[in-house]
Image (spheres, helix red, strand yellow):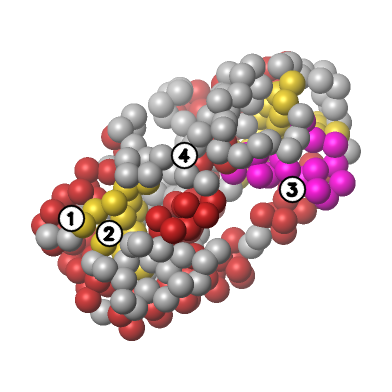
Amino acid sequence: MRIVFNVLKVGLGNNGGSKTLVRCAEILKELGNDVVIASQGNNYTWNKIKVPIVSSLPKADVVVATGFGSVKSTVQSSIPKKFYYIRGFEIWRASEKQLLNSFKSLRCIVNSEWLYPCDIPVVGREDVVGGLFHTKHKTKRHDDVVYIAHRLGVRCVMLNRDIKNPKPGELSKFYNSIKVWISPSELEGLHNCPMEASLCGCGLVATDHAKGGTLDYAIHEETCLRYESRDLDMATSYVEKLLRDNSEREKLQSDIKKVFYNKIGSKMYNMTKMAGILQS
């Protein structure tokens, strides 16, 4: 089966969404499919992409739109099977009405239910909190992480601020310097950073916002501590609790791994499922 991931007018860059997309394409190739990415440019430099990149939609069995910008060209293409791999709710690109209409135009695959490593012990880590630094969209709420750290008088380190474009080993080392990861973002697909941090031993404190991207795996008092959206007093108290209570943090971190394995699954497992959907 020849599959083309349509990234036209979406773009490839050094970000979590592109990283996920590239890895999905590579795994589908490993499963025996002929996979290409159609993109007008490539600013992704985190690692070498192991599938071909072409500048326009080639002949294929399946075309997969990867963002709002690529829906129109996907719908208009002559490729027989057309899908939309929805990885987030892109209100920064289009209105909610436009997005919902775009979902109706194609068969959709989502990476989070709300849309339709390392094993280094955390005991002995310094009191450091971490989060994702992102200034482009206010919904990322990175200022909340800084605010909480300041209130508690602990060091705060942030991905994309203190470390940029890390290689896999550097990223693991970064996560393993953190005791508690804070996820205040209010608009994600399946939020990767909290998952990566948890797999590297961080306790997780996350917003309960319905579109925060963590609802698939972040279960209050089972795999993390969830605070009411924008309630920074509650968030601060939860972060302080996990900084002080090693046993609680270890239990939550251990249980969230089980959820990843049993519910989220490996990329190979998920791409096998996707291949089955694309063939249907």
Q: Are marks 4 and 2 in contact (CB under 8 Å)?
A: no
198 up-or-down from 96: above or below: below
Q: Please tell me whether mark 1 sits on a helix, a strand or a loop.
A: helix
Mark 4, other Cα within 10 Å: few <14 / some 14–19 / many ≥20: some
Q: Please tell me whether mark 2 sits on a helix, a strand or a loop.
A: strand
**Would residue 30 be counted in the magenta stretch?**
yes
Q: Are marks 1 and 2 in contact (CB under 8 Å)?
A: yes
Point out which mark residue 165 bears. 4
Q: Nearer the viewer, mark 1 or mark 2?
A: 2
Screen quadrant of the C terminus: top right
Mark 1, other Cα within 10 Å: few <14 / some 14–19 / many ≥20: many
Q: Which amino acid, by three-letter code, is at mark 1? A: Ile
Q: Is residue 248 left or right of residue 21?
A: left
Reading the chain from its start, which is encountered first: label 4 or label 2? Answer: 2
Q: CA distance from mark 1 to mark 4?
A: 25 Å
Q: CA distance from mark 1 to mark 2?
A: 9 Å
Q: Over which residues does the magenta segment extend? A: 20-36
**Would residue 14 be counted in the magenta stretch?**
no
Viewer-proximal residue among 256 and 94? 256
Q: Which amino acid, by three-letter code, is at mark 2? A: Val
Viewer-proximal residue among 72 and 135? 135
Mark 2, other Cα within 10 Å: few <14 / some 14–19 / many ≥20: many
Residue displayed at 66% across by 37% down: 48
Q: Which picture quadrant has residue 214?
A: bottom left
Q: Nearer the viewer, mark 3 or mark 4?
A: 4
Q: Which residue is mark 1?
A: 148
Q: Position of residue 83 (x, y in %)?
A: 71, 34
Q: Which residue is mark 3?
A: 27
Q: Position of residue 189 (x, y in %)?
A: 49, 45
